[in-house]
Amino acid sequence: MKPSDKEILYPYVLEDKPRFLLGWVLHALFRRAKVDENAMEGLKQLQQEGTLVYATKYRGHLDYLLYHFNLRRRRLPYPRIAFDLNMSLLLPVTRLFKVLFSQLSYFYRSGKFPSPYQTGFYGKALQDGTPSLISLIDPKRFISRFIRAEKDHLQFLLETQRNLDHPIFIVPQLILYDTSVEKDYETLTDILFGYRDYPSVIRKILMFAKHRGEAFIDFGQPLDLKAYLESQPADRPLHAMVTEIRDALIESIDSRKRVILGPIMKSRQQLKEIVLMDPRVSEKIESTAASEKKSLRYARKKAGEYFDEIAADFNITYLHLFDIGLKWLWKKMFEGIDVDSSVLGTVKEWARKGPLIFIPSHKSHIDYLLLNYVLHESHMHIPRVAAGKNLAFWPVGYVFRKAGAFFIRRSFHQPRLYVEVFTRYIKALLEEGHPLEVYIEGGRSRNGKLVLPKTGFLSILLQAHAEGFCKDLVFVPTSMVYDRIMEEQSYRKEIEGGEKEQEKLKHILGARRLLKRKYGKVYIRFSPPVSLNEYLQQTNLATREVPRRFAFHLTKAINDVTLVTPLTLVATAILGAHRRGFLYSELLETVEILIRFLKAYSVPMAASLGDSNRATQETLSLLLSWKIVEMLEDVDQEEETFYFVEDDKKIELEYYKNNIIHFFIPHALVATSLLSGREAEKKLDVIVADYTFMRSLLKTEFLFDEKENEAE
């Protein structure tokens, strides 16, 4: 008689909580590992709806321990069973003896060791909702499956799912011990100890010992096996579905890895050779030599100099140093960085479709640093940043190149050879899969409004896509709003007629005084990603129209996700209704009217505006401390305090009002039409005509929706 299922114990199960000694060791080793926070709530929800099965690319005892410890520690569904992964050496002695006795007892009675597939052990665990772990690629297990026709993990899951009412969710899982970029050539370490993608035990231990503070657990999109089976033809072979699922899960894991690590890295010299040896660049070198009556040697040397002027020279060590320095800097300067991490999780998923192109608003020199810091902290490979050539001076240019910046001249009315080298460099970056960061406004906004977009760089990206250097481009419009801008005084000076000063080393050294002030919060918001392929299919535009229309589409998307903050709203209220001064009660009433208007149109607002009274009080106190707002206090304290803004200070409020003015412009134009003229009533067609005229008049001042129905 065979033993009952309950009597059979297997070495594939880890205790819910490791005993004291093992628990202490695991805590010492794994406590600094990080987990993708965006996935936490989703994992809990999936566990309530069905059975979770985590899928790793390769099997590994160290990986399993890391998953088990960190997920359990965060009170997330953690894998209690690892399919076919023998954990005997880590079991408590009493548990180990029980497992051995159970296995030997079964062997004595049946003449063979028990199979967890045949005895129903794995099946019951899936039925009971016990989270498990499987590996997708296992050379040893493949031989067993191929020669001995043993069960495949995915095949077993599909067969089990057919007999279950609740779904099995397979969640691709990735562990990275080292977040430095991968090279495209073999090293001696790769040959001796295995590749980073599939390291030997020795290399894995060494990587973990060296980088355990960087260890990061990431998750891909879950696959609902029940829904998958329902979508398949009834006669489709099981092995075909297994192959499809395995390929999809591996692709998900690999794409998540690329989002975090970036593409496999070619050296700067390799990129230089690719660019300068390109046939188009060679033709341009020859035509330049002929037109300028110079030798080919001179023209080739010039092309090389252009490449050196442009190209980044990324080095992960500088990135780590930047990260340490910026952590300290942001704590010194800001009260916090407010990021919508849920949308950023969506951006990670879209990165599978093609290179990410971040399109941020440009308000400050530190935009580059802030956005890349946020992306790095969110475990995304930082993009190559298009920086103005004015920032290429030493030592800033050198450091920025090492951190991933490349440099672009302000205008493309330059030697055609420069344009050809620059264009081919961008195509090379896209061909390798690098994300980019492009400031479509061309320069920083001095007045708080978005500058009308420039199309030169965008045209290069569109050309690269059309020529097949990438299958798709995924654009991510990004809004950056500051409670207080660092360059406030220099912008004011320029607006009042002063000349813009060229960036120099002395300005960097003089920036130390800025660290003595606090600048409130920074708010970063990401628009839903825009696939270029999908945009082109939906709009069906003529080729010559695409750059301009798409540029406006992206810029409007930045406006749409711009967050209304207490400071921008109070500045709008003061300048819109209280230019001559106000009582606090009057200001609060105006703020609440504006909030009701913004809510009616689902405009994104800071959470702190949920308590409008407190937000207004705190913002007013801030403006008083900055000496932008002043007050006249009643000595007898019988009347409310009267607040006012001197004329020379209103220009500072204008900047922050302009951050959100686009939300009010269409209604302001309609109101202007209604208030103009002497008629008691106005016909709709007259209002529409007025609106159309004013919109045309202001088209270089504000971004209007080109698809807008003016009558509406």
Image (cartoon, rainbow, N blue to C red):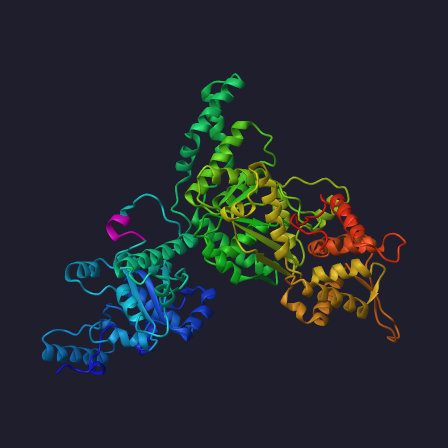
Say which quarter of the image contains residue 66.
Answer: bottom left
Main SS of residues in magenta = helix
Say which quarter of the image contains residue 257.
Answer: bottom left
Query: Which residue ends up furthest to the right in the rendered image?
Result: 678
Q: Is residue 267 magenta?
A: no
Q: Position of residue 363 (x, y in %)?
A: 64, 50
Relative to 15, is 335 above or below? above
Number of labelled discs? Answer: 0
Q: Position of residue 108 (x, y in %)?
A: 10, 79
Q: Nearer the viewer, residue 476 or 34?
A: 476
Q: Position of residue 605 (x, y in %)?
A: 65, 63
Q: Nearer the viewer, residue 26 or 463?
A: 463
Relative to 253, is 543 above or below? above
Residue located at (47% from left, 44% from top): 402
Residue located at (67% from left, 57% from top): 484
Question: Quadrant location of the N terminus?
Answer: bottom left
Please indicate, yes or no, whether residue 311 appears anywhere in the rendered image: no
Query: Which residue ends up furthest to the top in the rendered image?
Result: 293
Please indicate, yes or no, whether residue 375 appears anywhere in the rendered image: yes
Residue located at (16% from left, 80% from top): 101
Q: Nearer the viewer, residue 575 or 88?
A: 575
Q: Is residue 191 magenta?
A: yes
Q: Nearer the viewer, residue 209 or 706?
A: 706
Relative to 458, is 317 above or below? below
> Which portion, as a residue range, is magenta?
189-196
Question: Is residue 712 rendered to the left or right of residue 345?
Answer: right
Q: Position of residue 149 (x, y in %)?
A: 17, 62
Question: Quadrant location of the C terminus?
Answer: bottom right
